[in-house]
Amino acid sequence: MDDIKFIFLEINPDLIDAWKRAFTDHNLPLDNFSIVQSNLQDLPNNLRRFDCIVSPANSYGRLDGG
């Protein structure tokens, strides 16, 4: 599973800082993680290849687009 990479993508700098603090506070390596302050359309080219997006926007499990 060393080849699995995770991208944490957020526009809110406070949440970005909280994620970074959590990794530091828990002594977690960032080897397989990228924490990026950006929206999806402005994601840097080197991070634009991915297989899956997980978003809390659909936290109710509704699959009707609304």
Image: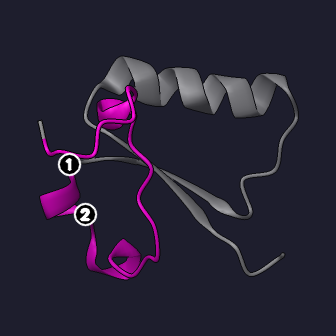
Nearest the viewer among 50 and 16 is: 50
Q: Is residue 50 magenta?
A: yes
Q: Residue at x 45, y 67 (%)?
A: 52
Left or right: 41 in relation to 46: left
Q: Give the range drawn in magenta.
A: 39-65
Task: Answer with the quarter of the image where residue 23 lies.
Answer: top right
Q: Residues within 10 Å of mark 2 (few under 14, many from 20)?
A: few
Q: In this view, does 26 lie above or below 49?
A: above
Can you say which quadrant of the picture contains the N terminus? bottom right
Instruction: Say which residue label 1 marks.
Output: 39
Residue at image location 27% in from the left, 69% down from the top: 44
Depth check: give the residue in front, 58 or 54: 58
Q: Residue 36: x and y, percent?
A: 40, 49
Task: Classify residue 61 by image quadrant.
Answer: top left
Q: Position of residue 4 (x, y in %)?
A: 70, 73
- Residue 7 magenta: no
Circle 1: residue type: Asn
Labels 1 and 2 touching (C-beta < 8 A): yes
